[in-house]
Every structure is written in structure tokens, then in C-alpha cells.
Amino acid sequence: MTTLAPEPAPATKPPAARPQSRLASLLKARETGILLALVAFLAVTTAINPRFVFSTDGFRDLFLTPSILVVLAVGQAMVIITRNVDLSVGSILGLTAYLAGRLFLDTGLPILVVVLLAVLAGAVLGLVNGMLVAFARVPALVITLGTLYVYRGIYLQWAGSDRINASDIPDGLLSFGTSSLLGIPQLAIVSFVVLAVAAYWMRTSRGGRELYAIGSDPAAATLYGLKDKQRILTAFAASGALAGLAGILYVARYGTISSGVGFGIELEAVGAAVIGGVAIFGGSGTVVGAAIGAYLLTSIDRGLPILGIPDFWQRAVVGLLILGAIVLDKVLAERQHKKLLAERHRS
Amino acid sequence: MSATSTPPRTPEKGSATTTRTYADSARPLPLRLLLTRDAAVLGLLVAVVSYSVVAIPNFDSQLTIYFLVLDIAPILLIALPMTLVIVTGEIDLSVASIVAVTSVLFGVLTREGAPIALAAVLAVLAGALAGAVNGLLVTKLGLPSLAVTIGTLALYRGVAVGLLGTTAITDWPDTWTDAVTATFGESQIPVIVVPLAVAAALFGLLLHLTSFGRGLFAIGLSSESARFSGVDVERTKLVAFVLTGLVSGIAGVYFTLRYGSSRGDNATGLELQVIAAVLLGGVSIFGGRGAIPGVLGGVLLIGVIGSALRLDGQSANVIQIVTGVLLIASVVSAALLGWVSRRVRRRPPTAAEAAPPAVPTAGGM
Amino acid sequence: MPSPAAPALRLSDVSKSFGSVVALRSGSLSLDAGSIHALVGENGAGKSTLVKIIAGLYRRDGGTVEFQGQTVDFRSTAEAKAAGIAVIYQEPTLFPDLSVTENIFMGRQPTSRWGRIDRRAMRAEAAALFARLGVDVDPDRPADGLSIADQQIIEIAKALSLDARVLVMDEPTAALSGNEVERLMTVARTLRDNGCAVLFISHRFDEVFALCDTITVMRDGSYVSTDAITDVTVEEIVRRLVGREVTELYPKQDAEIGEVLLEVEGLTQPGLFTDVDLTVRAGEIVGLAGLVGAGRSEVAQAIFGVDEYAAGEVRMAGQRVPRRDPVRAMDLGLALVPEDRRRHGLVLDAPIARNITLATRGRLSRGGLLTSRRENATAKDWAARLEVKAAAMDTLAGTLSGGNQQKVVLAKWLSTAPKVLIIDEPTRGIDVGTKAEVHRLLSSLAGEGMGILMISSELPEVLGVADRVVVLCEGRKTAELSRAEATPESVMTAATAAAGPTTHGQEKVS
């Protein structure tokens, strides 16, 4: 390993240039754009109906409603960053929610143990995805499309016509799902913690950085000698575990577990990640962006009626947002590329 | 170097002396037909049908076949153009949403007083337009079809739900609803098998017996080589997407009349069944490989397993599990077979073939 | 600086064959620490094979390799890398989305407690590396959009951080502009002064003579000579490189040269080529010569319409060939046999028959239908004419040898009955026997009135086959030489001429 150059000149130069470039890059970041869009949307809806934010319920829902999708979007972003996709998260969510419900109903296990078991079950289901993707070298789209069917089928077959009601769920969990700490709903705090841990890991650990490397250029990752299979397994296991956690959050929030739990939410998770700037072909984007994307999606869902648009149009707006995001990313990437080319020719 | 002694003859002169001759294929015809993914799927289909006929009561009844055909019709229709799209290496996840939006459009136009025939045509054209939007975003802007069609999946479904909300348009004249469920005379064979067969034949011809079809395969295997050989890659892909939209529109009209209902949530999740059927039928998700007979086998297999399990008293959930397992097994087995055949092929490098590789392969010898 | 008695890397009589094809007969080379060593030779002289053996990509069949006095036998690139050998290729592989710093340290980032990456230290180290190399690259910018020159610098910085003792640069300057070459040379000198043994492979003699201390010449897979750079001249090196009378090897039969078929005027695409004019007449073979990266393939692909051009015009027999429309170009009688057979020429996973008929599939259709029977009949006919060695028409093109693959590509394009055939590196990667076949074929095609534009990096091929030679240097036409005027020296001089168009003047570069 080469040690730092002894000359002071180059060593002192970078810090001087740093703060400015950090601020500039923060302003230019894709996440900032989506955050501004979110703030603008909230501002407009609140201007029309102040109760949207400035009421006890409004303020609570602002944080509470997105928490499940945020947790899913974080896991989804980690998978998409490796140039894969996990379509089975909705089914995992349903299955683990039902598993938790059954555990509460049939066993007297403490809440914490059930939570851990549900998260573990999610991780195992995610690991199955990961192994099929990493070792069979089959596109994740197909594998997770298959496990979407299988996991959902297992869940529905297991559940039959049973339905788990709020009365079957321990009060401790239900009150956790509705209570707040310092005005912030506890579920939202859970999602913040998940987000913070994931963002920190993705940014500062070798494992996290290697997820980006693998998604950026899988062939180069092999050349560099990175443990790509292991990393892909990690990403899928994380996505599964977070879907398991989302299942618990669902139980805590709604109490009832019927056949429709988690149906179609995988596309919302992918949509949130894409809107938040995670490139569908991997290598770039952040979990923070995906989380903001999730906030935007759920806020629009709640805010459309206030803007005078029947909430039936919510999915159409989501579709336009996804398309807008990928077109925007493409345009930005091309402009950047052209700029760099032009710079190169000038020099 | 055996053949370098003879002077090369130039094309135009093409001397008449006996020269090298070539077989059409290195393998005899029966083997060539049997050792394909299509044959495997069709074989599996025959096995499942045989078993079901013997083991499941009423499976061979005409009524079973009647419902089987009516149920798989939309999957079969959309699977045909979807095969073209996947052969080029792209994908279209928005088909079920196009079915819904055309179904709703068909309903709304009819409600507003348009003649049913005209409304149907307009709905089908709207489907083609929806496919064109997908195609243009993919070809002109160079966006990944996976992301584009996840977006339009939400968009088209959203428009469908937005137009009708949770209401449904259910008053359809019997002449029209009866037409799609009609049978031949006293039998229980539905009339729609005829248009289905015609559609399958047309797409079979298009994919396997036209220069357009050759272009589709070339694009899927090597888009760059195809472009360098005069294949208009953008236009070919665009046509595939437009056809998918158009046929989804036809499926939308069918769906509406078959169930007598125009609703925003029609055909939810149908895209997954279509893609599962296509991949099960031996079409490679990487593009460049696949055939219509195999796809028909894949569609029928999913349909037959579904009705067999249903008659056997199994729930729809078991059918879902089986569909998922089949889908995973089909791609994993393809990957496994590919791996085995590469290992086998790698072994005997004859002297003539062992020229130094033009492109350095990482990892080396 | 410690100067050990043993050379940093010594190869003696190293050989490597692929089946019956000998890629490297007898390679010898001795690199000293603190010195820059040039390796020159024509394409096919065995330089790349030698580099791949050093890099651990190939294993040698015979001879010895000693690294710092120890005999070594690298089984993988990782082993060579771990020992302290770094190879900078023409086009490095980087992660486009990640920052320059991350690209240097991926997989071995400095970490502090709990595995947290110490970004500050990493960035400082990257900055220090660039400072040591004396280059100005922003360590925070993404690798995406970096010029090839900068990508190479990143690779060099990576090698430096791994403390490489031997640095191999495999034609690094081929795709670089003048300033970039200057900077790379400065970096190479810095490495040398740090005690690195640098192997510098290049076709450009001005660079070799300006930069290197020692020069080794290879020809036909064998070692020819090693000299101190001050003891030899460019002329002497060129003579050793070519080493034989070239005209006899590639007979071109005399053909009647007819009317102008292909006219190219002022073809320009910023950054790639500028103001290129050329004509090809019926019965004529025009050689398009120049160094790798001079823009020859780019010009060919722009003419055929698979690539964009910003300005200029292409005409076939007086008719305008539209921009970016290969289908129309084909209709007007153009054909392009591309340089990269595996990526552009063939659909490797498709059968021979489908490959041969891909360009004529429209014409072969009857009533809109195209049958395998028809395709096979046509394909068999063409395969037989070109003597493609294959058993059956459904053999996958990717399984054929290089020479037979080239014949399949030729068959595809000849079946379109072109008036002008553009052929890019007609004999790259194919064996000697098939090479001669291809040359005779080109000659007899011209004899029948076809116009041929041939791009080649092999000087003897250009000089032996072409009636006229157009030379490009850095995207500009620097010479147009008649068959009589074209000599190894005149072509090489024009190909290495720095900016400013010169015709056949013979500059000394030393």
C-alpha cells in the first residue's frame, strides 16, 4: 500500500475545494429534485386544505401511511442497485403478516420473538430468490415473478378462508402501530431507523459499495474479484427481511389480515425506487431517494382528492411519475454525457 | 490446412467442378424436432392431459374444454405478440392494463351511444396506440422496456380505473355476449377456437416464415450484428410493441363481452400469466430463442393444469403455486441445460477450430 | 533507488500455440527497474500474446519467465497482479457509476472501526496518487464519461496503489489525442523515476523514440533485436519490422479500373474524423491505412450508415447515400464487412445459413414468405463458393474458426451483389492459409469490376493488395499514395504524421 504523499501541497488542496463541491453536489443530487417535488406537492395540497398537514390526523398520516412502503422501497432499491429486481416482496409481506398472525393466535410467543421470526422468515424467502438468481444465472425478473406466485399461493392456501382479526393481535403491537413518540408515529420511527441503517451501510461499508459496483458493471465486478454472488444473496435476503418487517408493520397498523394483503405493492415499491432516482439497470441511486419516492407516491395517493382529482386516478398519476422519472433520468444522463464529450473536445 | 490448395473460385464464376457439400442439419430430422424446448413442453402437455383424462373425473367432458378455451383465450391471444417482443429481448408488462383500458373504453363509448362495432374498433385502435407509446419510449428514447412498461402498467390501469371508478358497465346486448361464447351447433366446442387458431397461425407465419421474423431473432441474439446487416432494429421493435398493444385491445373487447362487464380492474395480473406461459413455452427471456408452437403448448399447459386442479377440487391457490414453480423450473432448467451443453461443447477443440481467439476471454485458458 | 542485479522481469524463448496456429514462437524480453522498454512489431508479430502471458491470461507452452530473479508461472491475472505486475489495456474496465476514487479502491477500501470505509483517507490517497503522477483528475467525479486517456490514468493509479513493480502498457496511446499522449508519457516517466519497470507497446515511433530507453523488435512471433534507443534510427527499426519483400506475398491481378462508384466528400464527425475525401472506382482496391484509432473504422461505418456523421456527403454511382440508413446503402450497392466479426459481423448464436441470408432475407422471400429450404439452398451455394469448412447449415456461426467466420460474413455480403465492398481488417485473427484465400478473392472480385475499400493495419497487406492507399492520421487524411508511391516508409510516415496534412514527405522522428 502506498502511503500518503509527504508533500503538503496536494494534501491541503482538496479540503479547500471540498465544502463548496459538497453543497453543489447536494443541490444537484437527484434526491433533492424529488424532495422538492414532494415539498411542492405538500405545499399545494396544504394551501388548498390546511388540514392535509396541519391537523392531528393529517400530520400523523403524513408519516404513518408511507412507513410500510418506505421499508419495502429501501429493500427494493438495494436489489435494483445490483441490476436485479424483486417482484415477490408483496407476496412475502402477505405471507409473513399471516405467519405473525398465526403465531399470535396459536402460540403465546412474546411480541418481540414473533417479530424476529417474521423478519427471519422474510429473509429466508428472499434468500431463496437470491440463490435462484445468483446460481442459476437467470434474470431476477423471471425468478421473482415465479416466487411472487408461489409465495402468494402458499399464503392463500395456508390461510384458506381464515381471516385474522384485530382481536387476535396482542394489544401491545396494535398500540405500537397507532401510538406516537413526540408526535411522530412509532411505525414511522421504525421506517426511519431502517432507512438510516440501510443508507449508512450502503454508503460506508465495502459490502454496500460493492452492490453499486456489481450493478454498475457486472463484468468489471468479476474482473475486480468481488464476491458478486454473496453480495447478490445479501441484497435479496435484505429485501426479503425488510418485506417481512413490512408484514409486521402491516399487522401493527391494520390488525386484520385478509387475502388481499400486499397485493400489487411490489410495483409500488419498484415505482418508488425508480421515481426516487434508482436506475432500473443498477449502479446508481440511493435508498434515501427510494424512500422519498415512497413518500411522494403515498402523499399523492392521499392528496389527489384535495386537488379535485378523484383518487381513482391515483395509479395513472403514479404511472406518469414513473415514466417522467425515467425520461428525466435519460435526458439528464445524455446531457451530462454530451457536456463531458464537449469538454473533452475543447481541451 | 486442407483445402487451401485449391484456388478459390469467385462467386460469379462459380465453376461447375464438384465442391464442398453441406447437410441442412448436423442432426437427423426426428432428433432435431424432438430435442427442442417446444417438444419438451408439448410432451409435458400430452402427459398432463393423459393423466388428467385417466385420473380426474369429468376432465374429458366437453364442458371442461369449453371453459378451458374461453378462459385461456385472452392469455393465448396476448402470448402471441408477447413472444415477438420477448424474442427481441424486450418485455411488455403493461398488457393486462391495456386489456383493462380498452375494455373500459369499449364500455364508455358504447354507453355514450356509439355503435358497438365502432366502439370495438376504436378500443382495439386505442390498444395499438398504447402499444405504440410503449414502443416509441423504448426505441426513440432508448429507455429500458422493463421500466417503461412498469410505468405504463400503472398509467393504463390508472386511466381505466379513473374513467369508471368502481362502477362497471354491464348492459351488453345478448347478441354480442352470446357471439363470443357461442358453440358449434349442439357441441360444446366454442366458436372462438377458429379466430384463435387463425391468430396463432398468422403469428406463427410472421415469426417463423418471414423476413420480419428473421429480423426479430437476429435482434434478440445480437442487436448490433442485426443493425450492421440491414435490420431496422427500431422499427422492428416498434412493430412488435404495436402488435402487442393491438392484440391486447382485441383481448380487452373479448374480455368485456365474455364476462359482460367493462370494469377498471378487469384482467388484473393477467400480464404475469401471459409472461409465464410464454417463458414456459421455451421462449428465452434473453431474447433470440423461441417458437410459436412451444408458446401454444405453454398457454395450454397452464390452462390444462388449472382446470385439472380445479376439477380435482384444488383451490386457485394451488394453481398459482404450480404456475410459479413451472415458471421457475422452465428458466432454471434452460440455464442448466445451457451450462451442460457448453461444458460438452468445450471439450474437443479440433486443430482447425483452435485459432487464437480474436477477443481475449477473461480468465483465459 | 535500489537497482537489483536481476532484471525486474525476464522472458526467455517463450512460446505459445493455439492448436496448429503458433501465436508466439520465441519471445524474449528483459525489463529493468527504473527504465522504459519499448516493444514494437506489426500486428500478428506476437506482442499481444506475450503481454497476455505476462498478465497471467495465457499460460506459456515453453520458455522461462523470471520475475525479480524468481521463475514464475502465473495461472491467473490475480496471481500476476498479486506479484506486482499491472497491465494497462487500451480500453480499461471501470465502474461507470462510481467515483474515480472508488474505482481505484473497490474491494480493498481503507476501513476504520466496524468496517466503516474511511472516505477521507481514501480520497486523500487518491489525490496523493494523482499528485504523484502529476495529473489533474477530480477524484470525486464519476468514471462515466471519462476519456480513455483518463481511464488509463485511473488504471495506472490503481496499479500504483497496489505498488506494482512492472507496468505493461499495451498500445495505450492508440486512441489518445496529442495532449493526452504527452500527459501519458509524463506519467510513464514518473513511474520510471519511481523505480518501476515499464513496458511500452506502440506503433508510433515518435512516441517510442521520445519516451523509451530500450527497444525490442518482434516479427512473426519471434524476437528480432534489442537495442538502446540511442543506437538505432526509425528507418532501421522499420526495416527490421517488415523484414521481407512484401509485394510478392499478396498478388493483385491487374484489373481494368473503371468509373467512379463511391465518392465521399468532407466527411466529418467531431472527435472522430474530419473532412475525409475519398473515391473508389470499379475494379479498384483502395487501401485505407493508418494507426489503430486513426478513425478508419469510424469512417467506414459512417459511409455505410450504421454510424452518425455531422457533415459531408456520400454518393454511390452519383446517387446520394442518406445518413444513418444502412438498408438504403445496401440497396445502392454498398456492403460492409466490419472489423469486429463477433460483435458486428455475425449473429454468433444463429446458424450459418441464417447468417449468410440475413442481409438478403427480403429478396429471398416469395409472396412475403421465407422458408428455411430457400435460405439453406442460397447459403449452401455461397458457402461452397467460399469453401466454408462446416458440416451443416445449422452449425452455429460462433463455433467456426476465425477464418471460416470471416468467410460466412463475406458470403453474406457478396450475396447482396454489392458494387462496392468495404472490408475492415479482412484477415485479422485468421490463419495464414485462409489469409491468402481472402487476398486472392479480393483481387478477383476487383477483377470482375467490384470496387473495394480495404482497411488494414497490416502494412504488407495494404502494400500488396491495394491499387491506391489513403492514409488517415488522427481522423484526417494525411496522404493519398499510388501503388508506386506506397512504401512502408511513406505510409508509416503519413500515419504517424502529427497535425497538419502532409503528403509523402519523409520526416525523421527521433
Image (spheres, rainbow, N blue to C red):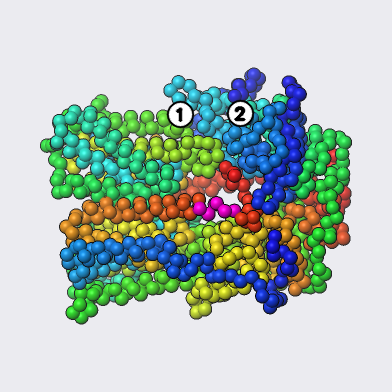
Q: Which residue is mark 2?
A: C162
Question: Where does the image place residue C507, in percent across and percent down from the top left?
Answer: 87, 46
With respect to residue B278, does A24 lie above or below? above
- Position of C478 with respect to A233 (left or right) is right
- Position of C234 with respect to B7 (left or right) is right
| Secondary-structure class at tag 2 | loop
Q: Which residue is mark 1?
A: A204
- The answer to which of C98 and C428 lies nearer the viewer is C428
Q: Residue A127's quadrant in the figure? A: top left
C62 falls in the magenta region: no
Range drawn in magenta: B344-349
Question: Where does the image place residue B299, in percent across and percent down from the top left?
Answer: 32, 63
Residue in the image at 16% along x and 48% along y: A160
Residue C203 visible within the image: no
Residue in the image at 69% along x and 65% along y: B3
B345 falls in the magenta region: yes
| Secondary-structure class at tag 1 | helix
Residue in the image at 57% along x and 46% along y: A337
Residue in the image at 81% along x and 59% along y: C249
Residue farthest bottom in this picture = B185
Q: Residue C424's quadrant in the figure? A: bottom right
Callout 1: few (<14), some (14-19), or many (20+) C-alpha neighbours within 10 Å? some
Give the total number of marks visible in the rendering: 2
- Position of B87 with respect to B11 (left or right) is left
